Image (cartoon, rainbow, N blue to C red):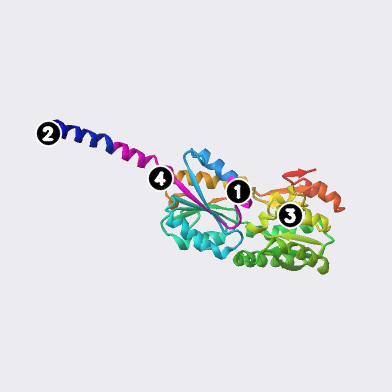
Amino acid sequence: MKRRAFITLLGSAVAWPRGGHAQQSATPVIGWLGSETRHADEVRLVPVRQGLKQAGYSEGENLTIEYRMAEGQYDRLPALAADLVRRQVSVIVLTGLPAARAAKAASATIPIVFEMADDPVAAGFVSSLARPGGNMTGVTSLNVEVASKLLELVHEMAPSATVIALLVNPGNAARAESTTIEAQAAARRLGLELHVLHARAERELDAVFANLVQLRAGALAIGPDTLLHNWSEQLGPLAVRHAIPAISPYAEFSAAGGLMSYGASVANLYRPVGVYVGRILKGEKPADLPIQQAAKLELIINLKAAKTLGIEVPMSMLMRVDQVIE
């Protein structure tokens, strides 16, 4: 009996550390809450994965990512966020104001790491940029404040254009409103006539450019928005095809053939998101991780588009440009 008791006790002693070790080494799961499609978000996922790798995590090796995509239907975001909470993910990662609101409403305890163009303090997500408090932190580009600069730059490139259009996504109402207010103030200052155009689905883009012709708009500024970012490859060629000098906050627009872009690079915005997720997985708290801000905005000019549009790029702009596409 004593020998059996000893063997049983020894077996228990050996089995307990194994169970404890398995629990400690369990693969962490993070949730990606996307406003659009998985394909559209891939441009953001690449630098996020790079940041995670920098922090020591690789998807499929020692990390699992659960994807929940709204596919442009923002009203689905609350249910998707709630599903990630039920899944008990370790961290929720997201981009944009609507997704951030859905995640914040879904959980006050699961760490949330965001990227957004809005001010997270003004939006009520964090207490301050230096010390966020709560369960949210991330990166902001504050691109809404760039709206006036977009108008200034496209007007400088096409000074004869006195009628300018602004494209926003009404599905993201708060972003559309703040961008419009900023652009209207800039238009008044520059003495320009501004028309605000809306698109919430890709199929509406042809109608947008038809409206530009009817309005006799001489230039187009594309507002900061996740959906409009995802359409960069469509918007760039469309603008040139309709002979419209256009500017976007996203480098993908000028790379796709659009005239110019001005904003923070996607890599510089999303790589820190991945790093922050890695630090949280290792035990740090979102409340103690300062909100990072895009330190540099890049001006990119597509000279091929300028030539097609019959525009001679001012030397003053060429001296300030960060990248030229020929």
Please, what is the three-letter code of the amino acid marked with disc 4?
A: Gly
| First of labels 4, 3 by sequence position | 3
Residue 41: x and y, percent? Answer: 61, 51
Q: Which numbered tag is attached to residue 44?
A: 1
Front label number (1 vs 2): 2
Residue at point 71% right, 49% down? 299
Residue at point 66% right, 67% down? 181
Q: Secondary structure at mark 4?
A: loop
Which residue is identified by label 4?
A: 283
Which residue is identified by label 2?
A: 1
Marks 2 and 4 sit apart, C-alpha to C-alpha, by 46 Å
Answer few, some or many: residues within 10 Å of disc 3's Cα (few below 14, many 20 plus, some between 14 and 19): some
Q: Secondary structure at mark 2?
A: loop
The count of marks equals 4
Residue at point 56% right, 60% down? 97
Q: Secondary structure at mark 3?
A: helix
Marks 4 and 1 sit apart, C-alpha to C-alpha, by 24 Å
| First of labels 3, 1 by sequence position | 1
Which residue is identified by label 3?
A: 234
Q: Which residues are magenta?
A: 17-45
| Magenta-colored stretch includes residue 31 | yes
Location of residue 223 (image quadrant) = bottom right
Q: Residue furthest top?
A: 3
